Amino acid sequence: MKVFTMGVHVLDVLVRPVEAIPDGQGATLVDDIRMTAAGTAGGTALTLAKLGAEVRGAGAIGTDPTGDLLVQLLARAGVDTEFLVRRADTATSASVLPIRTNGDRPSLHLLGANITYGLDDVPWDALARATHLHLGGPELIGVDVAARILSYAKEHGVVTSVDLLAPGVLGSFEQIEAALPHVDHFLPNEDQVLGFTGEADLLTGARKLLAAGVGVVAVTRGGDGALVVTADGAEPVPAFVVDVVDTTGCGDAFSAGYLRGVSLGRTPGDAAVLGSAAAALVAQGLGSDHGDFDLAAADAFAATARSHA
């Protein structure tokens, strides 16, 4: 599997545990502060590399120290960062995430350079030689730009997938519609399906995406697992029960596991099982890069967890 993870790259600063921000100039001691690579492209790249894929990142970041650290963290994880473009006049995207004891993660987010990525930045020749393209956050770069990139990939035999970044409440169908005919695998969460399609029912929303041209819709539903919807029907995939430390990066880990499963010829349902396993492994620690596992370990975890369910 030779995959481009293109789009949103973020440096996350995670603080745990945080129940409240101190008043005024007060201070609170915490157990852990970590910085990790993240984002619908960057976070997915981390887990894909663990699962044995050859990963190249593509997106826009700043020339600031935040960008330097982000590149270092991705490279350390085995991600090729050659095609991350650096902007001298725009900051690298970053988030501060105060993690609550139950794993919830409110966010303070800087959009930064992600929204500046455009057609002139795309490494077209290298993209044509990939087997897979995962485009994270197409709504940030504009649907016309996203559609052009995805259609080019499809024309060159590259399997395409898309995940969204914006919350569903900020979405509309017009933000994604033109790109959908070029998407083999669409990997949003439940809130995004409902928000971007304008439907009140998850299955109806997923079918609207299929009708617009998507091949498969695999929807993450947090603790309720995932729902895989194709032209042949809908298949629920349960979540694995684990002690959750932090849900940061779980959706990206699901995308990575799902796509790795697809690359190995697994059915969408079986690919979603691998995605759920990867998400569960990441959820047991702090940050998108948590977990020292590979494909064999993720498959073994899934098999063991299912046998005890």
Image: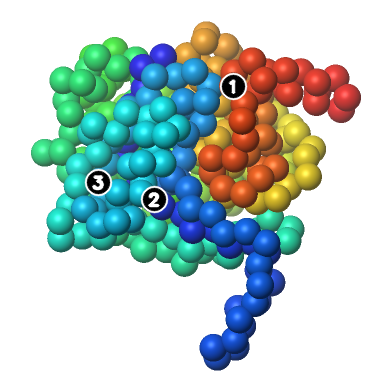
Identify residue type, mark 3: Ala
Identify residue type, mark 1: Asp
> Could you say whether the residue bearing mark 3 is in a helix, strand or loop?
strand
* Residue underneath mark 3: 60
Marks 2/3: CA–CA distance: 10 Å
Marks 1/3: CA–CA distance: 28 Å
Quadrant containing the C terminus is: top right
The residue sitting at the top extreme is: 265
The residue sitting at the left extreme is: 120
Instruction: Work out whether mark 1 precedes mark 2 in sequence or the reverse, and give the earlier one.
Output: 2
User: Which mark is nearer the camera, 1 or 3?
Assistant: 1
Determine the residue positioned at 11% across, 38% down: 120
Image x and y of residue 197, in percent: 46, 47
Judge whether 138 appears above or below 159 on screen. below
Q: Residues within 10 Å of mark 2 (few under 14, many from 20)?
A: many
Identify residue type, mark 2: Val
* Residue underneath mark 2: 10
User: Which mark is nearer the camera, 1 or 2?
Assistant: 1
| Pick the front one: 217 or 6 | 6
Looking at the rendering, which quadrant does residue 214 occupy?
top left
| Pick the front one: 292 or 309 | 292
Q: Residues within 10 Å of mark 1 (few under 14, many from 20)?
A: some
- Number of marks in picture: 3
Marks 1/2: CA–CA distance: 23 Å
* Residue underneath mark 1: 294
